[in-house]
Image (spheres, rainbow, N blue to C red):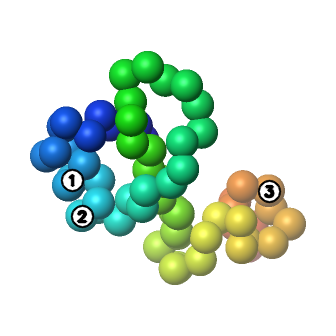
Amino acid sequence: MMPESKLKEACALYERSGFEPVVVFNDEPYSDRWYTKALTRASGKRPSDAGTHGAGVDSVKR
């Protein structure tokens, strides 16, 4: 996410929602603040913790 710092309400919303500031990673002329958020599954595990199923796809027992 890349809100502009003068959009204080937007920045506060991102921060309340668990987004964390990160260092600048592009030259976007309309942004001066960057955020990231680690996504988790309902199980509490990150998708990358799901093992060999790529992007966190669970195997289905049939």
Is the C-beta separation of discs 2 and 1 under 8 Å? Answer: yes
Horizontal arrangement in the rendering, residue 48 relative to residue 40 (left or right): right
In primary-sequence order, the first of circles 3 and 2 is 2
Q: How many marks?
A: 3
* Residue 39 in view in this figure: yes
Q: Residue 20 appears at what percent x and percent y?
A: 42, 61
Residue at position x 19%, y 36% in the image = 6
Q: Residue 51 appears at what percent x and percent y?
A: 81, 72
The disc labelled 3 sits on which kind of residue?
Gly
Q: CA distance from mark 3 to mark 2?
A: 30 Å
Q: Residue 11 appears at what percent x and percent y?
A: 25, 48
Residue at position x 49%, y 23% in the image = 28
* Kind of element beneath mark 1: helix
Q: Which mark is residue 13?
A: 1
Residue at position x 29%, y 53% in the image = 14
In primary-sequence order, the first of circles 1 and 3 is 1
* Residue 62 in view in this figure: no
Horizontal arrangement in the rendering, residue 23 relative to residue 18 (left or right): right
**Farthest residue, direction right:** 52
Q: Which mark is residue 16?
A: 2
The disc labelled 1 sits on which kind of residue?
Leu
The correct choice, above or below, for 34 with respect to 39 in the image is above
* Kind of element beneath mark 2: helix
* Kind of element beneath mark 3: loop
Circle 3 residue? 54
Is the C-beta separation of discs 1 and 3 under 8 Å? Answer: no
